[in-house]
Image (spheres, helix red, strand yellow):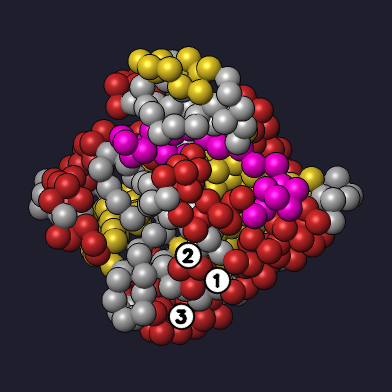
Amino acid sequence: MKLLLILFTITGFASSIKDYPFYEYKALFTNPICKEYRYNQQVYSNSGKLLISKPKNVYCKKSDFFFNNNRVNTPHFELKNLIADSDLSSLFLTYLSFSNQEVALALCDAAKRGVAITFIIDSKNRERKSGRKWLDYLSKCEDILGNKPRVEFRGNVKGLGYAHNKIIMASYKSTSKKTKIVFSSGNMSSGTVLHHENWSFLTTSKDTYFYQAHLCIKEGMLTSISKKQFKAFMKLCRSKIKTKEEDDIKLYVVPSDGRVAMNNIVSAFDRAVSIEAAAHRFTHPDLVMAMQKAAGQLKKVRFVVDDDIYWAGKRKKTTGSNMVSEFYKVMSVLRSGVEVRYVQSNQNSRLLHHNKYLIFNFADGTGAVHTGAGNFTKAAFTKNYENYYYITIPEVVTKFKDQFEYKFNWLATTYEMMPSEYINP
């Protein structure tokens, strides 16, 4: 596919994404509101306390969807508004999975009114009936001229792992330079509503390095057929961008930038005076060692993980997506002095604590957030298609810090207060 090099022009020397026209950044968190689910038998914590129920607004069931689906100021609400915008001209989406019926219906409506839609999804969905249901539905939606959305399967071939990116790029009819870029921890599934997730909606100019680098991701995923080819494409494509990269939001693309991204994380651990972390998966040895080192230096390190990690260790078998080895890695950082708490999600319904972010607090009062699509695993930094971000925009960092405090202090559970038996309401 022909590269859109027309965008790669010199547009000034802005060092902040905020210096460009159209700037707006919404950092949103799902924070589902769910019923309190009581146990129907006696359950005790590791400390011997009788437990009455799972934590409210943490453990959710599919029946909680309908209330949360209609809440405002949520990622799901923002997504629906984005897709329904009558000024929209095109949408590019890439996700690991797609099972969100309401988003599928909204995308079909957009396609029928002439919005050009391109959707890249992980190739393992090709043979899954459940994974294809809404893709097949979307691919049949057409406008009055017979134009239909383009659906492509990628990943899991020639050195590439999962197509695990989570990106939306929107263009508009009335203002050709305006774009909205959405990136998240969540997939296009219950990840918009009932998972515990973080979503970013950034409106900016197409003149930014940030946008043009995302355009490289899009073209690279559409045209590359191997890990080697994608890395070469990204290097060439980014070299053609004449705009200076913004200082306050950095993009790391895997498989091309994984080592650089992890080195940046380790460096931030060394420079920070305190760190907050949230994770779904936790296997990367560099991150384990960085946490242990920081705690050993008496830095305050707090860590929130999905309780599937806890149960994988307790049950001595894989639970949800989490392996037994992850339990021991979490216990190793806990023993080193890291404060660890667990989010008691409902893996039986595949409703998870699916966040993955790190917050760094520096001695001069500034901070930074590392977030994005990828888990804290080696595959996510070496072979998957992933998009990561290192953000120093103060108000965005504050949003993440406030969210972490809520999660850590009000929703998450200490090891001592975790149930001693695997029993669900």
Type of amino acid under label 3? Lys
Residue 72 in picture, x, y percent from top left: 45, 23
Comparing labels 1 and 3, the label whose residue is closer to the camera: 1
The image shows residue 381, relative to residue 395, as above or below, that is below
Q: Earlier in the sequence, mark 1 or mark 3?
A: 3
The local crowd at label 1, few if under 14, some if 14 to 19, many if 20 or more residues have their Cα within 10 Å, is many
Q: Is residue 141 left or right of residue 360?
A: left
Q: Residue at x 62, y 32 (%)?
A: 416
Which residue does the numbered mark 2 point to in the structure image?
A: 380
Residue beneath the point at 29% across and 61% down? 122
Earlier-in-chain disc, 2 versus 1: 1
Q: Are marks 2 and 1 in contact (CB under 8 Å)?
A: yes
Q: Which callout, 2 or 3, points to the residue nearer the camera?
A: 2
For mark 3, what is the residue? 231
Whether residue 65 is visible here, answered yes or no, is no
SS for dot 2: helix
Label annotation for residue 258: 1
Residue 27 to residue 360: above or below: above
Which type of secondary structure does the marked residue at label 1 adopt? helix
Question: How many residues crowd around disc 3 within 10 Å: few (fewer than 14), some, or many (20 or more)?
Answer: some
Point out the tag, 2 or 3, that comes first from the N-terminus.
Answer: 3
Distance between the alpha carbons at the discs numbered 2 and 1: 8 Å
Q: CA distance from mark 1 to mark 3?
A: 11 Å
Quarter of the image that includes the N terminus: bottom left
Q: Which is nearer the eye, 188 or 317?
A: 317
Residue range of the region highlighted in magenta in the rendering: 332-360
Q: Quote the CA–CA distance across marks 2 and 3.
A: 15 Å
Residue at horizontal 34%, vertical 26%?
A: 61
> Relative to 246, does residue 357 appear above or below in the rendering?
above
Q: Amino acid at mark 2?
A: Ala
- State the residue in front, 69 or 36: 36
**Could you tell me residue 393's position as x and y percent?**
70, 48
